[in-house]
Image (tube, helix red, strand yellow):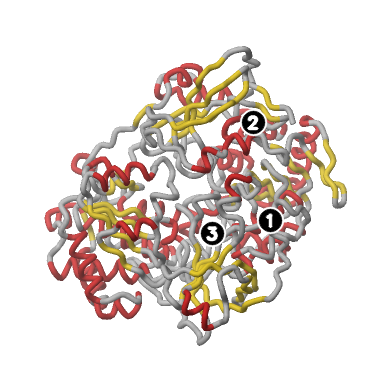
């Protein structure tokens, strides 16, 4: 493997500033260069987001850069093998196959897929919209977008916790903020707020470092968060713990909301959530009577059928308490004037008749409003040609059977495609099925504009591995070959210059300047109103029923837990990034095996000891995990490691054995966004005497 500095700089020691992307966070990093090669990484104290913090995943970046299993040249599949081919031939072939499919089946027959956003999401959408396909597939329905859309439809924008605004109370709800970080918001800000005296409330079914330092921990039943949010609203309205002036001046639907939540008294909510009625009241009191409070809603809330309504309820809590767009509360993101997340996708280029063909758009209109196709509908189109045939997949950085529900169906769908292109760093189970595999660079090998709520920053290309290219460069190459050049640029630097024009920078000057902090502006609604049709907060949303949703947030209890079953949930690992990095020895040593966490009493009743291998079964399938005894989960709850596979084995089938999505099924129709249920799946456990996973 050849690794070199792209500018050929040698014979000197220098330091370059960049932005890590080994996880969601985007921590500032100082990259030390020796003789033109990346030699060391450390946290950047000058970063407006991370202030020098740098986690174990970030420290493994150099290991990722130099890993011997990295893909380094384009590969064409011939039977069960992949053979090398030149870049121009690879892109020519891909463009020809895409054009051929569009001519035969229409642009909608091409699906673009992406994994968790690596700051190129708007590029994928721009390519799709100008190509003419409405079908962009991503984990949006189980990640940020239930929260994004709930917030947009309620108050017209997306909110972030203002940790630096001196909150008195911070609620971490389904979020392990100190270990896993959201886009541009690093746990260091939370930690400093706690050091300054903020009270911490944690709502989580499992004990963790945060619950141990919390002033109040509510060990909620997985998937019942929506009932608790409605219960909080009930108590706050009944006790008068809300900002009456804000409600009267800036919201619509308060009377209807108050009547709606009357049925969610603390006693009933306790029965739905597994909590005590007193805990419900204590939570509402701590939040409702605080002068400044914020709620960090994690992806734990975005992964059950009540996700959208739950997150609507939480946005309403912020509004009623007077914490919406207020110091120390939940501040609406005010974008800097770059051509970025909102404008760069060129949504207006997609014709209305094509928008109407978006897969899953009829069933899940709120997800479709955000521009995303629904995965269940995509698999139906691939396998059954319903409502039309999908024959082509262009996949950017997603290991699909590991991250989507009903993994067996996902795998079958991929096997039946006429043309499948995957861009990735490694030969994943998804890449093994692809006709064309294109090698992409890690974050150290990319020039990118990092756009988050708190700052804008340059990510700099400081290394070159083999023939790897960035996803953006691949999209530029395909766009030129498909006749879309009028919407793109001849090279990446020209594109970055265009994106930065609104703030008076070129890519060269921006790299020299470094991060630009995005200072929050509070209570923008006082002069501008909210970015809703009425200019007010929609406690009741009159348009949602027309989209198959509910005007007021609802809670629909799941099915009762059958005898002999457990409620299965999962949580992000601090060592991995969804399905990534299990190749990296430094991280794998920290978490060598896929585990299922079981309460000691429940394990003893089944004859399971720590280290035993356990077969976990659901109505959808089975997977096997190593038992870890944990008294921090309830006796009827188990936690399984998500997105697990065994890259050290090779082969095409290692994705199945310990994959949590062998246990999950199709989305429940009740959700406006078709959110898959990852957090309350009924499972049974069985000790198995001998494991055949071959894991070390």
For label 2, the SS is helix
Q: Decide which of 263, 467 is in the foreground and name it.
A: 467
Q: Residue furthest top?
A: 11
Q: Check the image and report above or below for 66 versus 270.
A: above
Q: Which residue is mark 1?
A: 646
- Mark 1 closeness class: few <14, some 14–19, many ≥20 residues within 10 Å: many
| Tag 1–tag 3 contact (CB < 8 Å) | no
Separation (CA) of disc 1 from disc 2 = 30 Å
Residue 122 seen: no
Which image quarter holds the N terminus? top right
Q: Check the image and report above or below for 443 versus 179.
A: above
Q: Is residue 247 left or right of residue 23?
A: left
Separation (CA) of disc 2 from disc 3 = 30 Å
Residue 473 tag number:
2
Q: Earlier in the sequence, mark 2 or mark 3?
A: 3
Q: Which residue is mark 3?
A: 361
């Amino acid at each position: 493997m050849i690794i070199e500095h792209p500018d050929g700089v040698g014979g000197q020691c220098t330091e370059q500033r960049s932005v890590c992307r080994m996880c969601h966070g985007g921590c500032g990093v100082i990259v030390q260069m020796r003789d033109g090669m990346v030699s060391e990484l450390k946290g950047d104290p000058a970063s407006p987001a991370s202030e020098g913090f740098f986690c174990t995943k970030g420290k493994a970046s150099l290991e990722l850069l130099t890993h011997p299993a990295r893909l380094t040249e384009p590969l064409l599949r011939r039977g069960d093998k992949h053979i090398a081919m030149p870049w121009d031939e690879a892109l020519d072939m891909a463009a020809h196959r895409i054009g051929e499919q569009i001519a035969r089946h229409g642009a909608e027959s091409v699906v673009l897929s992406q994994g968790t956003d690596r700051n190129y999401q708007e590029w994928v959408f721009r390519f799709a919209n100008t190509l003419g396909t409405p079908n962009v597939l991503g984990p949006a329905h189980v990640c940020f977008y239930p929260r994004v859309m709930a917030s947009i439809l309620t108050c017209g924008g997306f909110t972030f916790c203002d940790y630096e605004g001196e909150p008195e109370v911070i609620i971490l709800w389904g979020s392990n903020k100190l270990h896993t970080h959201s886009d541009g918001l690093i746990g260091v800000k939370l930690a400093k707020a706690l050091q300054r005296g903020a009270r911490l409330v944690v709502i989580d079914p499992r004990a963790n470092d945060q619950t141990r330092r919390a002033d109040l921990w509510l060990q909620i039943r997985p998937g019942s968060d929506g009932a608790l949010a409605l219960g909080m609203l009930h108590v706050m309205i009944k006790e008068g713990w809300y900002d009456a002036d804000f409600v009267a001046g800036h919201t619509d639907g308060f009377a209807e909301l108050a009547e709606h939540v009357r049925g969610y008294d603390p006693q009933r909510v306790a029965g739905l959530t597994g909590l005590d009625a007193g805990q419900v009241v204590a939570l509402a009191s701590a939040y409702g009577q605080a002068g400044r409070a914020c709620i960090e809603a994690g992806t734990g809330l975005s992964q059950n059928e009540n996700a959208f309504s739950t997150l609507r309820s939480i946005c309403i809590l912020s509004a009623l308490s007077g914490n919406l767009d207020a110091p120390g509360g939940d501040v609406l993101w005010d974008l800097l004037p770059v051509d970025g997340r909102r404008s760069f996708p060129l949504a207006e280029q997609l014709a209305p008749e094509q928008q109407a063909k978006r897969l899953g758009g009829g069933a899940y209109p709120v997800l479709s409003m955000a521009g995303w196709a629904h995965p269940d509908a995509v698999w139906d189109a691939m396998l059954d040609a319903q409502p039309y045939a999908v024959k082509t997949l262009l996949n950017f950085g997603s290991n699909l059977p590991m991250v989507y529900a009903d993994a067996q169906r996902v795998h079958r769908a991929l096997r039946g495609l006429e043309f499948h292109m995957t861009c990735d760093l490694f030969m994943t189970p998804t890449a093994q099925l692809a006709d064309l595999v294109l090698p992409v660079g890690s974050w150290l090998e990319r020039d990118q504009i990092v756009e988050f709520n708190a700052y804008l920053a340059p990510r700099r290309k400081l290394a070159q591995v083999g023939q790897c290219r960035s996803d953006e460069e691949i999209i530029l190459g395909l766009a030129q070959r498909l006749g879309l050049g009028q919407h793109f640029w001849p090279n990446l630097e020209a594109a970055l210059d265009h994106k930065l024009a609104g703030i008076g920078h070129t890519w060269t000057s921006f790299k020299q300047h470094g991060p630009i902090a995005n200072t929050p502006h509070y209570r923008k609604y006082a002069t501008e109103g909210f970015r809703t049709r009425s200019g007010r907060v929609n406690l009741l949303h009159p348009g949602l029923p027309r989209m198959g949703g509910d005007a007021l947030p609802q809670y629909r209890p799941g099915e009762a837990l059958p005898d002999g079953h457990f409620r299965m949930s999962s949580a992000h690992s601090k060592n991995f990034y969804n399905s990534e990095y299990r190749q990296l020895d430094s991280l794998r040593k920290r978490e060598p095996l896929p585990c299922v966490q079981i309460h000691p009493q429940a394990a003893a009743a089944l004859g399971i000891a720590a280290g035993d291998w356990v077969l976990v079964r659901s109505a959808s399938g089975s997977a096997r995990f190593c038992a870890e005894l944990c008294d921090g989960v309830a006796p009827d709850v188990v936690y399984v490691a998500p997105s697990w596979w065994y890259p050290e084995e090779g082969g095409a089938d290692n994705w199945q054995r310990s994959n949590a999505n062998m246990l999950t099924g199709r989305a429940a129709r009740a959700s406006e966004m078709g959110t898959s249920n990852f957090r309350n799946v009924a499972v049974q456990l069985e000790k198995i005497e001998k494991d055949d996973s071959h894991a070390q």
